[in-house]
Amino acid sequence: MTSPSVPTLVQDSGVPFDVFIQSLTEQLDKAQAAMALKARVAKLPLTFAVKDVSLDLRAFVQVVDDDVFVRPSSPGDTEASTIKLTLTTITRSMVEENAVDFKAEEPQFTLREALQGHMSDEDQRRLERIGVRTVEQLTELRKTAGTDVVARLARMPVNRLQQALMVAAAPRVTQVEAPGPESAGNGRGGLATRVHLQAPGLRAGRIPFVRAAGQDVPVVESHEGRIVLAPHATQLGLEAEVDFGDGEVAHVPLTAGSLGRWASGRAAGGAA
Amino acid sequence: MLRDLSTVLEDLHRGMLAAADRAGPGVRINHAEMSLPVDAALVFKDGGCVLLADVARSHADASWRESPSRLTLVWAEMPTEALP
């Protein structure tokens, strides 16, 4: 007899394997955190920690739509498979040695900030589960694996992912570089403030047309995915219009850390 | 009654510390291994999937399982500051 409150798929097939692994690691992390907290509160110099965990889980395994589902065996079940999992603990020093330096990457542009409410928390969690936490990671993964693959891995509808990619591909100011004191009297003249923009949708060889305060903004460098502007002093801090061609127009304030937005009417498919 | 696996691990940790405290003079435990038959289940609660588990309390409780799941834990003594 099955409970009507539990979805049929859960009753029959269990949960996706990655969800099971995530629930296991969450429990281990929670336990380790609680044990570490107790040791710190008690000011113990040494404590016992789980070094290795092995779980031989008696379970039924089923493949549904290319996904592996796991259901732990229940009382009375026979002929269950055994899934053997072994996990090990990483210490603080191992974490520090292997951690990605987010500061060096792009501190102000986490996926959450860049998408500016255009993606639900659940969809963001889906992307985080596959290791995508920043705009850079998302655009890199799309380049190497393709939108369809990313959507399938993250278990997201392709159209929602495309919409997120479009928003994430809007230009943003990564750095405002003030002219150094040496530029004033070295005869080079004209070395103005440089505004560095990242624009994941910008292809190499294309120079966007940028305007602010009714005047052109000089584009001094254009590379794949980023441009450098040399705005006039009167244009700094104002909203610039960046025309990438093919109807792709975005607006971005010329201030450090600004996130751009696409002009209305831009086609979702134009994010590539 | 199954509990969150983390709660079970915390109880085992408490037992491990108590056992280490009770070690006689001149003896120090710095490594231990537990291999335990467990019952496990996955449930949806608090907006996610939670792994519940517990050790079999007695043979009478778990005799209906010919081959239960098994949890093996290796405990090691380590500096508190090295914990993640």
Image (spheres, rainbow, N blue to C red):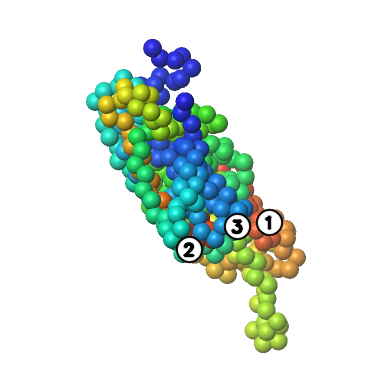
Residue lying farthest bottom? A186
Q: Residue at position x 43%, y 61% from top?
A: B26
Residue lying farthest front? B25
User: Taking A129 as reference, is B64 above or below it?
Assistant: above
Q: Secondary structure at mark 2?
A: helix
User: Taking A218 as reference, is A169 above or below it?
Assistant: above
The numbered mark 3 sits on a residue in which chain? A
Same chain shared by disc 2 and disc 1: yes
Q: Amino acid at mark 3?
A: Lys
Disc 3: which residue: A43
Q: Residue at position x 62%, y 45% from top?
A: A116
Q: CA distance from mark 2 to mark 3?
A: 20 Å
The numbered mark 2 sits on a residue in which chain? A
In the image, which is nearer the foreground, mark 2 or mark 1?
2
Residue lying farthest right? A234
- Identify which residue, A75 or A199, lies in the foreground: A75
Residue A86 is situated, as x and y percent measured from the top left of the image, at 34, 46
Residue A238 is situated, as x and y percent measured from the top left of the image, at 72, 58
Mark seen at residue A93: 2
- Identify which residue, A237 or A89, lies in the foreground: A89
Residue A53 is situated, as x and y percent measured from the top left of the image, at 38, 46
Task: Answer with mark 2 or mark 3, whichever residue precedes in sequence.
Answer: 3
Tell me the quadrant of the picture where the N terminus of chain A can be found: top left
How dense is the environment of label 1, judged by Cα within 10 Å: few (below 14), some, or many (20 and up)?
Answer: many
Q: CA distance from mark 3 to mark 1?
A: 50 Å
Q: Residue at position x 36%, y 23% from top?
A: B60
Q: Is residue A110 among what the camera can see?
A: no
The numbered mark 1 sits on a residue in which chain? A
| For residue A73, side relative to residue A240 (left or right) | left
Mark seen at residue A253: 1
